């Protein structure tokens, strides 16, 4: 088998496909490897490379490096949670583009799957690294990139903790943190996913949103989000989908950043339900841009989503 190429003087030439693939794989050895060889340790090394690029950006922009201290999580989180958290990094890098008048691109969603291998998280972090490289070009930063360091003995939770650090590091570069309007955009993505699930189950939805609590705080929104996560796990239990222990997250939310992270955990778990229902190509829509939203609206939509999931039981989930 051969492919068509261009030769000297634009004369067409034919090259054996095998030679082209071998050449390409020589430049991209990670792709040539068995996917199972991409371990959490390899993914963690990629996160370290991203951290190096963020430090380079900080030096160029004159941003003083800030040490972010937070008690590491020790829960047995899965690669799907780290893959979903990578969306948060892309979302925040997009905000950096917006702040500086650069063209923006909506952060995308992954195909719903019951299980996500570390390779998927690795691919997501390579997308983050590519976006960082593009930003470095935009900012006129031209320094050689460091090679991925050798790392051993890491688990998915170690990758997750590192991505949380990187997320805060991007906040520091951006000069601010997430606000309720941006969190609201993520709640609407959850709302869309749940509507997709109800439609697939042919469930008539006549729910109405709960009364808005005008004085609601991010702590209140986080609490409802955690309860919603529990409802998603109820569906997982009905479908015999292995569940994750999220107990360390209970009562841990205090600001919009924490609520945003909770929405990502909910979205990660909803993908398993969609995969169980065969909704492989029903991608979570990108976040829309909202302004003027408060924790009260975030809490209200999360509460509405919880009401919607109450409609699902053993009688209609398996019909």
Image: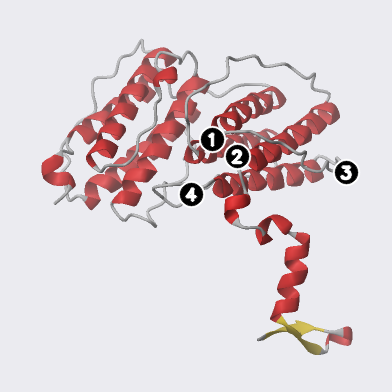
Instruction: Characterize the local packing of mark 3: few (<14), some (14-19) or many (20 or more) Cα atoms within 10 angstroms.
Output: few
Mark with earlier residue (3, 2): 2
| Helix, strand or loop for disc 4 | loop
4 and 1 marks in contact (CB < 8 Å): no
Residue at x 89% of width, y 84% of height? 8
Residue at label 2?
Answer: 40
3 and 4 marks in contact (CB < 8 Å): no
Residue at label 1?
Answer: 85
Left or right? Give the position of 252 relative to 101. left
Mark with earlier residue (4, 1): 1
Q: Measured along the vertical axis of the image, is residue 167 above or below residue 317?
A: above
Left or right? Give the position of 198 relative to 164. left
Determine the image quadrant of residue 16.
bottom right
Instruction: Characterize the local packing of mark 2: few (<14), some (14-19) or many (20 or more) Cα atoms within 10 angstroms.
Output: many
| Helix, strand or loop for disc 3 | loop
Residue at label 4?
Answer: 110
* Disc 2 from disc 4: Cα separation: 19 Å
* Disc 3 from disc 4: Cα separation: 31 Å
Mark with earlier residue (3, 1): 1
3 and 1 marks in contact (CB < 8 Å): no
Residue at label 3?
Answer: 144
Eye-nearest disc, 2 or 4: 2
């Amino acid at each position: 088998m051969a492919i068509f190429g261009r030769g000297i003087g634009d004369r067409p030439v034919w090259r054996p496909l095998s030679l082209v693939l071998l050449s390409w794989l020589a430049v991209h050895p990670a792709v040539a490897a068995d996917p199972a060889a991409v371990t959490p340790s390899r993914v963690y090394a990629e996160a370290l490379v991203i951290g190096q690029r963020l430090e380079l950006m900080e030096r160029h922009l004159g941003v003083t490096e800030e040490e972010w201290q937070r008690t590491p999580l020790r829960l047995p989180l899965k690669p799907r949670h780290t893959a979903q958290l990578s969306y948060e990094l892309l979302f925040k890098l997009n905000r950096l583009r917006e702040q500086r008048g650069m063209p923006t691109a909506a952060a995308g969603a992954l195909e719903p799957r019951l299980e996500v291998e570390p390779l998927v998280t690795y691919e997501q972090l390579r997308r983050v690294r590519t976006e960082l490289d593009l930003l470095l070009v935009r900012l006129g930063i031209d320094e050689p990139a460091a090679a991925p360091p050798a790392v051993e003995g890491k688990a998915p939770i170690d990758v997750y903790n590192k991505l949380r650090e990187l997320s805060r590091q991007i906040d520091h570069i951006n000069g601010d943190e997430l606000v309720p309007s941006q969190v609201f955009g993520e709640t609407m993505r959850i709302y869309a996913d749940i509507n997709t699930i109800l439609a697939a189950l042919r469930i008539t939805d006549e729910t109405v949103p709960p009364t808005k609590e005008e004085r609601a705080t991010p702590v209140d929104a986080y609490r409802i989000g955690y309860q919603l996560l529990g409802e998603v796990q109820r569906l997982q239990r009905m479908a015999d989908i292995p569940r994750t222990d999220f107990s360390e997250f209970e009562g841990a939310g205090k600001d919009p950043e924490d609520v945003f992270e909770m929405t990502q955990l909910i979205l990660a778990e909803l993908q398993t339900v969609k995969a169980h229902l065969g909704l492989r190509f029903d991608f979570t829509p990108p976040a829309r841009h909202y302004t003027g939203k408060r924790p009260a609206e975030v809490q209200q939509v999360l509460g509405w989503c919880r009401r919607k999931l109450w409609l699902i039981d053993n009688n209609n989930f398996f019909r």
